[in-house]
Amino acid sequence: MKKSNDIALLGEKTVFEGKLSFHGTVRIDGHFKGNISSDGTLVIGEHGIVEADIDSNCVVISGAVHGNINAGLSIEILPKGQVHGNIFTPSLIIHEGVIFEGSCRMDKTKCVPEKELPEQTRDKKGLIKFFPTGKNTGEKEVPEEMEKQVNHS
C-alpha cells in the first residue's frame, strides 16, 4: 500500500451516488448511496451516512451504515456508529453505545491466510493500526493529517 497516493476523503458536505471501488484507504464523512468494493480500508466518519452494500477488507464505522457489510479482515464499530444490516467478518469489535440492527456471521473461511495478515496494534484510543509490511517499523501507513481525521471520530 502506498503511503499517500491511496487515500481519499469524501467530505462532510459531499453527496455521491454510484459504485465506489478502491485500493488503500477511503474516509466518508458525507452521504454515499450505491455499492462499495475494496481490498483496502473504509472509514465512515461520525457524520458519514452510507446506504450501500460494502465489500472491503477492513471497515471502521463512526457514522451510519444502511446495508450489508462483508469484511475480509475486520469490522470495528465505534461508540456513535450505527449499522442497519447484516455483518460478515472474521473479526468484529463493537464499542459501547453502538446501534446494531441485523445479524452477524463470523466465518474464518473467508480470512486472508495468517501469514498475509498485516500486524495489528492499538493506539491510545484503542483504534486498530495496521502496518502493511507485517512488521511494526513505526512507519505510518497514512499521512498525519489523515490519521488525525480518522482518530478524531
Image: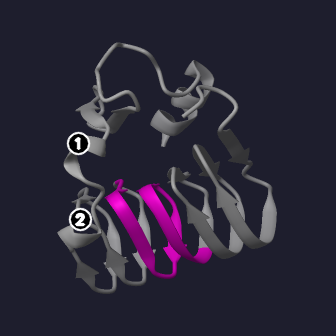
In the image, farthest residue toward the top? 138
Left or right, 94 with respect to 7, comes to left
Query: Residue at horizontal 72%, vertical 52%?
Result: 12
Question: Disc number at residue 90?
Answer: 2
Q: Quadrant of residue 89?
A: bottom left
Q: What residue is drawn where x is 35% and y is 72%? A: 99
User: Mark 2 falls on what kind of element?
Assistant: loop
Which residue does the image show at 60% across and 56% down from the upper left?
47
Q: Position of residue 41 (x, y in %)?
A: 50, 49
Which one is nearer the viewer's eye here, 117 or 141?
Answer: 117
- Please report the residue visible at 57 percent of the width from the left and 34 percent of the height from the top: 149
- Horizontal and vertical percent for residue 73? 32, 56
The amino acid beneath tag 1 is Lys
Where residue 5 is drawn, which disc sits there?
none
Q: Which residues are magenta?
A: 51-78
Count of residue discs: 2
Of residues 76 and 119, the one nearer the viewer is 119
Q: Residues within 10 Å of mark 1 (few under 14, many from 20)?
A: few
Asked if the stretch drawn in magenta spans residue 61, the answer is yes
- Residue type, numbered disc 2: Pro
Residue identifier under label 1:
115
Question: In the visual, does 129 lie left or right of 146?
Answer: left
- Label 2 crowd bin: few (<14), some (14–19), many (20+), radius 10 Å: some
Q: Earlier in the sequence, mark 1 or mark 2?
A: 2
Q: Is residue 60 left or right of residue 39?
A: left
